[in-house]
Image (cartoon, rainbow, N blue to C red):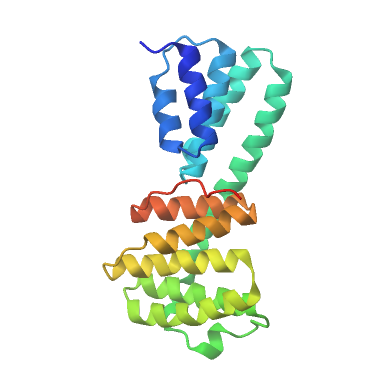
Amino acid sequence: MVPVATLLSETWAALCAGDHAGVLARVDALPDGLAPGERGRAEAWRAQALRALGRVEEADRAVIAAIRAAKADGDVEGVRQLRELQASVVASLAAQRHAEAARAADAVLAEMDDATVLAGANDEAARADALLRRANARTDAARIDDAAADLARAQAHAEASGDPRARVLVRLALARVAVARGADPGALVREAHVLADASDDMNLVTAVARAARAAGVVLVAPGFG
């Protein structure tokens, strides 16, 4: 049996290396009956790995478990830090649910013409977003060629805007189109991953992770330097 201290050290190393699946495997291998401080660290690392994999609801449950363990350990500073992590996870969960609701509401866009879709879109980022929303609706409706045409235009607007959100989400939408056409979405998802990581927007990072999981794309931590 691997000693607890070794497993915890390996778990932390895996988290630092961006090996999120490795984090989960090592936390799952930890025995029952850990000291509260050890359990708190393990659950905090589990929460971070789950969020990075786009499994935000599970991350929320893990961070709650981490807070309970830190309280049992009397670790006031640990609880404070975990509350910050929890706030970030809850924000990601809210963003995910909002995006799902918005996508369902956008179904009507699939049949709308350019004038209607682009009404009020007064800058490059807004035009990218409008076309992206219609493209996603058309992908959902299996109108793949129409979606691809929208995304070609959306990408041009996104690049002109320089807006990280638009650039990431267009690539994720293009990856969905690639999957629908039987093509490999890997390069598009990885491009989105690099852009999301550079943006320091955890909601974008989570969106990429969810898209990667859906498309079967394995992500590694972007390189430094």
Does any portion of residue 216 appear in the rendered image? Answer: yes
Question: Which residue is pictured at 53% across the width and 56% down the height?
Answer: 194
Name the quarter where the N terminus is drawn: top left
Is residue 191 depicted above or below 213 in this figure?
below
Question: Which residue is pictured at 55% across the width and 46% down the height?
Answer: 93
Q: How many marks?
A: 0
Q: Which of the two residues, 17 or 25, is positioned nearer the viewer here?
A: 17
Coordinates of residue 14 in the picture (x, y in percent): 48, 32
Is residue 167 depicted above or below 97 in this figure?
below
Q: Which of the two residues, 213 or 134, is positioned nearer the viewer here?
A: 213
The residue furthest front is 225
The residue furthest left is 182
Image check: 140 left or right of 100?
A: left
Question: Which residue is pictured at 41% across the width and 53% down the height?
Answer: 212
Is residue 165 depicted above or below 33 in this figure?
below
Does any portion of residue 107 appear in the rendered image? Answer: no
Coordinates of residue 142 in the picture (x, y in percent): 31, 73
Coordinates of residue 220 in the picture (x, y in percent): 45, 46
Coordinates of residue 47 in the picture (x, y in percent): 53, 33
Image check: 31 left or right of 101?
A: left
Question: Which residue is pictured at 51% across the width and 37% down the height?
Answer: 17
Image check: 219 left or right of 199?
A: left
Is residue 55 depicted above or below 167 in this figure?
above
Q: Which of the two residues, 119 or 191, is positioned nearer the viewer here?
A: 191
